Image (spheres, rainbow, N blue to C red):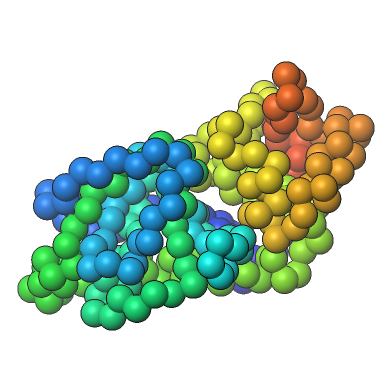
Amino acid sequence: MDHVYTSTPWVVPPDDPLLCDLFRENGRLVRFQSRRVVNFGEEPTAYLVSKGLVGTFAGGTGNFERLIVFFPAGTTVGAEKSLKGSYAIKPLIARTLLPTEVLALDAPLFKRELEENPALAIAAFRSFLRHDDAKIEGLLMNATLRVQERLALVIKMLFLALGLELNRFPKRLPKSVTVTELARFTYSDRSVVSRTLAGWADKGLVSEKNGAWLFDSRILEVLGENPEG
């Protein structure tokens, strides 16, 4: 599969170690339960995800269905917005997809550290550019791929974001990543995703056990990739 900006659509790659070290040295620990909705970026705070997974979604009140990007451990959430100095309500939320721990850093301290340390500022802005690449690539994939291709790619990216290897041994995604969530991630309907998974099962590309879908490298065939790598 050809990509334009990055080979990891929807998944922010690890941020620069200099940026992560700033949060580890100065941030305060905050814990969130799974499926907690947080208005990252609407308050003067930046966060480093140290454990778990966060997704950002666009939409309207009570209808935030459009996945923007996943932030796995080792990436910053709301950092760019915390520098803008404007905290007007935006049609954007962050949702924890797993029990999640973050290190919170107040925006004034974050901004001051960037101003006083040019190397840190460059590291941060390079990280932010990679954030944008993942977001733009995800939008391209949503606009150009069929539902079954989007679904296969999202599952592949979720395994990457969770630090799980997509190999020949079937694995399930976390319980919080339901068929409904997969439909939300792929800009599709739950019924369409359910039918797609059932069709894959008939072809031997996925399997089901005790109501949970199990995925392995065979799903890469949908993307025209070699399951054996």
Q: In the displayed structure, would residue 79 be above or below residue 222?
A: below
User: How many numbered badges does the structure rendering display?
Assistant: 0
Residue 39, by quadrant, is bottom left
| Residue 227 visible, this angle | no
Residue 202, by quadrant, is top right
Please indicate whether residue 179 sits to the left or right of residue 157 in the image. right
Please provide percent x and percent y for residue 174.
Answer: 56, 33
Please indicate whether residue 53 sits to the left or right of residue 40 in the image. right
Residue 149, by quadrant, is bottom right
Pick whichever, 44 or 17, lies toward us: 44
Please provide percent x and percent y for residue 145.
Answer: 77, 64
User: Most extreme residue toward the left, as rendered?
Assistant: 116
| Quarter that holds the C terminus | top right
Please provide percent x and percent y for residue 41.
Answer: 34, 67
Please provide percent x and percent y for residue 117.
Answer: 11, 70
Q: Residue at x 12, y 49 (%)?
A: 25
| Residue 86 visible, this angle | yes
Q: In the displayed structure, would residue 116 be above or below residue 95?
A: below
User: Most extreme residue toward the top, as rendered?
Assistant: 210
Q: Residue at x 68, y 65 (%)?
A: 141
Pick whichever, 104 or 71, lies toward us: 104
| Quarter that holds the N terminus | bottom right
Q: Residue at x 62, y 69 (%)?
A: 139
Pick whichever, 32 or 139, lies toward us: 32
